[in-house]
Amino acid sequence: MAYCKFRADQLFTGYTLLNENHVLITSENGIVADIVTLENAGEDIQQLPGILTPGFINCHCHLELSHMRGNIPTGTGLTGFIAAVMKYPQPAQDFKNAQMRLADEEMYNSGIAAVGDISNQLYSLSQKTKSKIRWYNFIEVTNPDDEKAESRLAVFKAMADEFSAKLHSPANTALSPHAIYSVSPQTFKLINQSTQNQTITIHNQECADEDELFKNGTGKFSRFYQSIGRKTLPIPPSGKSSIQTWLPYFNNGQTIISVHNTYIAEEDIVFAKNYAAANGLEIIFCLCPNANIYIENTLPPIDLFIKHNCNIVLGTDSYGSNWQLSIAKEISVLQQGNVYINLVDVLKWATFNGAKALNLQYELGSFEKGKQPGVVLLQKDLGGSERIL
């Protein structure tokens, strides 16, 4: 069997960062054979500038929004962003397909090996069936009315079944609530019943007005509902923060990827971890820093997640809310000026943590014998990345 040998300035295994005196050995198609010291590696070693890492895991994306590239205004805040997306004219399906193909290729070539992708339509299936990327499909449930909960959930379950059948991945497809402001109490209860022991996801505390809505029933979200003709909220104000209002709907062994968390407070992080531990859940916090800058021009309280030893993963969000779909660019933003973020930690968020979150840790996320995680070269300045194998 022929082997490929790779050496770089540093080598990240998925767990630890090794120096330049280590060599990664794989088969020609990228199956990991070993990591050895330079003196034991023999000849024909490819020398590369930068950091070698396993393929990245993008835990939050919306492939089906790829056609919005460069067309949604930045800095509008979340309610402005939602309004812009709702008003965006729908192009022809051929154009959507072409843009999804470009986004898929961009992610793959930059070293993304798997994606946790939000889908509320079927049309991303056309690209996913041809893709080299592994997909975990979160079928995004929206329904603000209790009386429609069962009929709406049946529609989304049928969609999930089609994703599972076409992609041969029933274990990698799950119903997921869009957000607390778009899902009714009965819909939450039905999702909880339907997702036992599954990995699901939800958008959380992406703007300060989300908490304002559920604490006091006021703010931009309240006015947004009025502007679209809704006279009642999907969930009445609870007097509590967003996450303290929606998380208690779940108690069925789920792993929950809470996405964005831009305005989460320390007391909410403590609540979420304690509730999850007491109720047999796992809570994972997904950071999408470029999207947070794009929409709200701010970043989540990363220091608090680190302080409380949270399980963290990374995502890019979509081309409606990002300039590119690059985990390397997300790493770069997190590292800029954040001296309290250890590079080893953020690389683990981007690789092994993400793979484990999507139930792919036995195949992806680390350089371990027998795995085929992809081989990626991350630039020294963290500004970009490319797939090597």
Image (cartoon, rainbow, N blue to C red):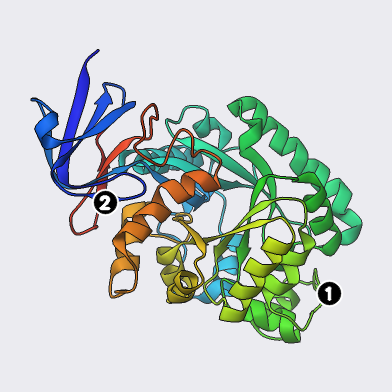
Can you say which quadrant of the picture contains the C terminus? top left
Give the number of the disc on residue 232: 1
Q: Please tell me which residue is depicted at 77% across the width and 51% down the height of the picture.
A: 252
Residue at horizontal 37%, vertical 59%? 345
Amino acid carrying mark 2 in the image:
Leu
* Drawn side of residue 36 relative to residue 93, left or right: left
Instruction: Tally the marks.
Output: 2
Can you say whether 123 is above or below 286 in the image? above
**Which residue is depicted at the point 67% across and 43% down?**
174
Check whether the beta carbons of the residues at disc 1 and disc 2 lie within 8 A of each other: no
Local SS, label 1? loop
- The amino acid pointed to by label 1 is Thr
**Residue lying at the far top of the rendered structure:** 1
Q: Quadrant of residue 269?
A: bottom right
Q: 225 or 318: which is nearer to us?
A: 318
Q: Which mark is residue 216?
A: none
- The alpha-carbon separation of the residues under discs 1 and 2 comes to 52 Å
Dot 1 or dot 2, earlier in sequence: 2
Q: Nearer the viewer, residue 82 or 336?
A: 336
Q: Is residue 346 left or right of residue 160?
A: left
206 left or right of 10? right
Residue identifier under label 2: 17
Q: Residues within 10 Å of mark 2 (few under 14, many from 20)?
A: some
Residue at position x 19%, y 59% from top? 381
Q: Is residue 373 above or below residue 245?
A: above
Q: Nearer the viewer, residue 246 or 45?
A: 45
Q: State whether residue 300 is above or below residue 91.
A: below
Q: Helix, strand or loop at disc 2?
A: strand
Query: Residue 380 location, x and y as percent?
Result: 18, 55
Q: Is residue 116 above or below residue 208?
A: above
